[in-house]
Image (cartoon, rainbow, N blue to C red):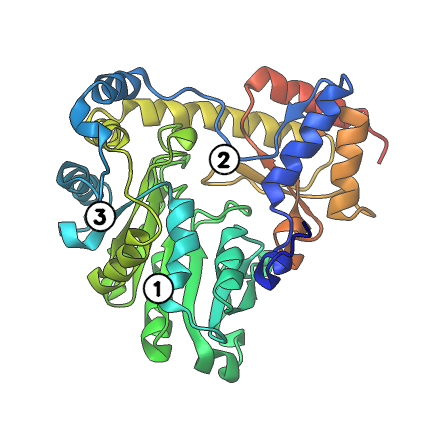
Amino acid sequence: MKIFYSEKLKKLPPYLFIEIDKKKKRAIEQGVDIISLGVGDPDLPTPEHIIMTMQESVANPVNHQYPFGMGMLAYKKAIAQWYKKRFNVSLDTDEICALIGSKEGIGHMHLGFINPGDIVLIPEPGYPVYNAGTIFTDGIPYFMPLVKENSFLPDFDAIPKDVLKKAKLLFINYPNNPTAAIATKEFYERLIEFAETNNIIVASDAAYSEIYYEECKKPLSFLECDGAKEVGVEFHSLSKTYNMTGWRIGWVCGNKNIIAGIAKVKDNYDSGVFQAIQEAAVKALTSSQQCVENFRRIYRKRRDTLVEGLRKIGWDIDLPEASFYIWAKVPNGYTSSHAVSKLLDEAGIVCTPGNSMGKSGEGYIRFALTVDVLRIKEAVERINKITW
């Protein structure tokens, strides 16, 4: 039987992080001692108190049935409580929808709001799912370059008027993957004004909001600003904050009509988030946040070790204020892909080429702080031995 893939599927580029994982596994099979700084998957374990809650919840037969709907009331109340404490943002339970990880919600959101030919404004370099969802709904992506000269923030004034007429949805992501940039309140206020003027829905991806390094520079929530709930929603995840990537649990919150649209899509695509995981998430959100602070200290030490080490051997790197990524310029004379290949072939180091996340990422490499300090020091030593 001959299999024919849909035109939409053929339009999709290879999923970046799957390809990186394949490359890493091939190198390991060849006996290479790999230091993996590629995929942003935390190496630290999920805190024990969350695991224990999950173990108890799995044993409860009540949790073995379909968990239909927008999420358990207890989970949504825990999210509202966490948002109030962290951002001083008030949320009603109908302004929150549980997700099977924020990736799932981001990818499905387009189905509720994009018709064929509608334009989606996408930051680049950026998370590939923003574009994948656009392709699956026959939308048209318009990429907004994130460049250092503009603090890695999109320039709304540079978007042509004919594009704005057809634009229906805009993604932002701060703290940013891959550039590690953070957004200011002034930026969010400008974004809200821009969205209101052009009748565009804002989707804020805040998955990295809790990985920051200075208490006085905590990342803001888009929803903290006046008018944000009128124009958009914010996606959140427990994956990076609590090292729960494999658990697949997150949420989206904000404008209740947008939330209702996302929930209706989900009602037709899945049957909700496993309740035992929701109960574990309640524990994570409502108990002591000391574990999160401990993780931040670990990432801070890793960040300092890698940035200081690479600077000493001549690399041009800014010190990130948030996320667990380092956005580094490649050595002169190299493209992103060439530099990444050289690091793998000559040093056994896996990282992400900046241009694979958007053409504005050319000339950069993304390092993920997902190995311990000793391995980071070893990575710097290996890089120092390469002749560039």
Closest to the observer, 162 or 61:
61
What's the CA distance linking mark 3 and mark 2? Answer: 30 Å
Identify residue type, mark 3.
Met
Describe the element under mark 3 as helix, strand or loop: loop
Determine contact: label 1, label 2, CB under 8 Å: no
Neighbours of disc 2 within 10 Å: few (<14), some (14-19), many (20+): many
Q: CB atoms at circles 3 and 2 under 8 Å apart? A: no
- Mark 3 vs mark 2: which is more N-terminal? 3
Instruction: Pick whichever, 217 or 355, lies toward us.
Output: 355
Q: Amino acid at mark 2?
A: Phe
Q: Nearer the viewer, residue 353 or 116?
A: 116
The percent position of residue 269, horizontal first and vertical second, equals 35, 51
Along the line of sight, which residue is nearer the eye, 236 or 328? 236
Residue 351 seen in the figure: no
Which label is found at residue 70? 3
Q: Which mark is residue 112?
A: 1
Residue 2, percent across and down?
69, 52
Percent across and percent down for residue 156 are: 47, 71
Per the model, the C-alpha gap separating discs 3 and 1 is 15 Å
Horizontal side of residue 246 vs 38, given as left or right: left
Q: Are marks 3 and 1 in contact (CB under 8 Å)?
A: no
Residue 51 is tagged as none
Residue 167's spot in the image, x, y percent?
A: 44, 75
Q: Is residue 307 left or right of residue 61?
A: right
Compared with residue 90, is residue 369 higher up or lower down, i.e. above or below? above
